[in-house]
Structure formats: structure tokens, C-alpha cells
Amino acid sequence: MTLPDDLRLIVFTDLNFPLIHTLVDESKREGYEFVQRTIDDWNSGANKFSGAGEALWGLFSGTELIGIGGLSRDPYADDHKTGRVRHLYIREAYRRKGYATLLMNTIIDKGRRHFNVLRLFTDTPAAAEFYETLGFKKANGYKASHIIAFPD
């Protein structure tokens, strides 16, 4: 898989810029509200991805924002060493080209350094299959469809 030279991955420190709305608009057309929820939670202070081990990444091709994905402490777990993959979204024109894998490998790598376990929730079969190819296992926990544990 060859990725373009102009690909950049940045950690967001602010979500107040017009490019984020292209992602929101496309995701809403597909029936996904979680990209808008990411912005709403950021603006309200509910989740700014600013805790230890947390980050929200933007994936850019040139000047175009083509995806986002985050890592936070899992608010649904009592253990502060449990992280949560949050709001992974790649624009439709960029899917199945390795971009989601690149972003998830970044999230998993950071997660491994700060958490013992990463959890996530998805209810779509294609997303479940994608996460399973990255090593996540099906789970039946509260608000968790998939989990990956890191050896000590």
C-alpha cells in the first residue's frame, strides 16, 4: 500500500475551522451523528481529548481533511487504564485505501503506551470486520462491542 506524500496526521488542539464541517456534512448524509457529537462534546468541554494518553487526530491529504479518530479514557469503564477508540471516520472517497488503518495504527500505538486495554463500540458489520483485522476481539461489555488488550 502506497500512501500519498502529502498525507499529514495532526493532533487537534482546536476544532473551530471550516474543514471539519465537510466531514460533519458527509457523515450526516450517511446517517452517522458521531462526528457532530465529537464537535459538540469538544465545544461543551465534555471531551476535549486532553487527558493523559488522549488525543483527537485529523488526517489530511494536502489541505483536505479526510478523516478523524480519537483516543480517550473510557468513560464507561471504572478502570483509568482502559482507553476508548472514539469517532473514527474516513470520507467515503478515501475508504479502502489504507487511511483508516493508518489512523487506527496510530491510535493503537498511543493506546498501548498509556492503557492496558482499548475498547470501542460499533454496530456495523463492516466496521466490526475492520477492527477485527486490527486485532480487536468481539466483546459483550457495557458500551463495548470490541476490545484489544496489551500484554504487560
Image: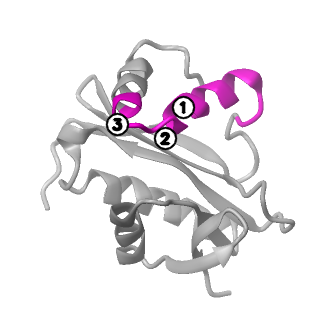
Q: In the figure, is residue 98 to the left or right of 73?
A: left
Which of 46 and 125 lies nearest the eye of the viewer?
A: 125
Q: Residue at x 75, y 23 (%)?
A: 44
Q: Which residues are magenta?
A: 27-47
Counting from the top left corner in percent of width and height, residue 124 is at 41, 60
Quadrant (top left/top right/bottom left/bottom right) for the C terminus: bottom right
The residue tagged with tag 3: helix, strand or loop?
Answer: loop
Q: Residue furthest right?
A: 78
Q: Residue at x 45, y 57 (%)?
A: 106
The answer to which quarter of the image holds residue 92 is top left
Q: Amino acid at mark 2?
A: Trp
Quadrant (top left/top right/bottom left/bottom right) for the N terminus: bottom left
Q: Which residue is mark 1?
A: 12
Q: Which residue is mark 2?
A: 57
**Mark 2 residue crowding within 10 angstroms, few (<14) / some (14–19) / many (20+):** many
Pointer 1 or 2: first along the chain: 1
Instruction: Tell which tag, 3 or 2, sits nearer the viewer.
Output: 3
Q: Which residue is mark 3?
A: 30
- The Cα atoms of the two marked residues, 1 and 2, are separated by 6 Å
Question: Is 43 colored magenta in this rendering?
Answer: yes
The residue tagged with tag 1: helix, strand or loop?
Answer: loop
Counting from the top left corner in percent of width and height, residue 18 is at 42, 12
Pointer 3 or 1: first along the chain: 1
Q: In the figure, is residue 143 to the left or right of 56?
A: right
The residue tagged with tag 2: helix, strand or loop?
Answer: strand
Instruction: Tell which tag, 3 or 1, sits nearer the viewer.
Output: 3
Q: Residue at x 33, y 28 (%)?
A: 26
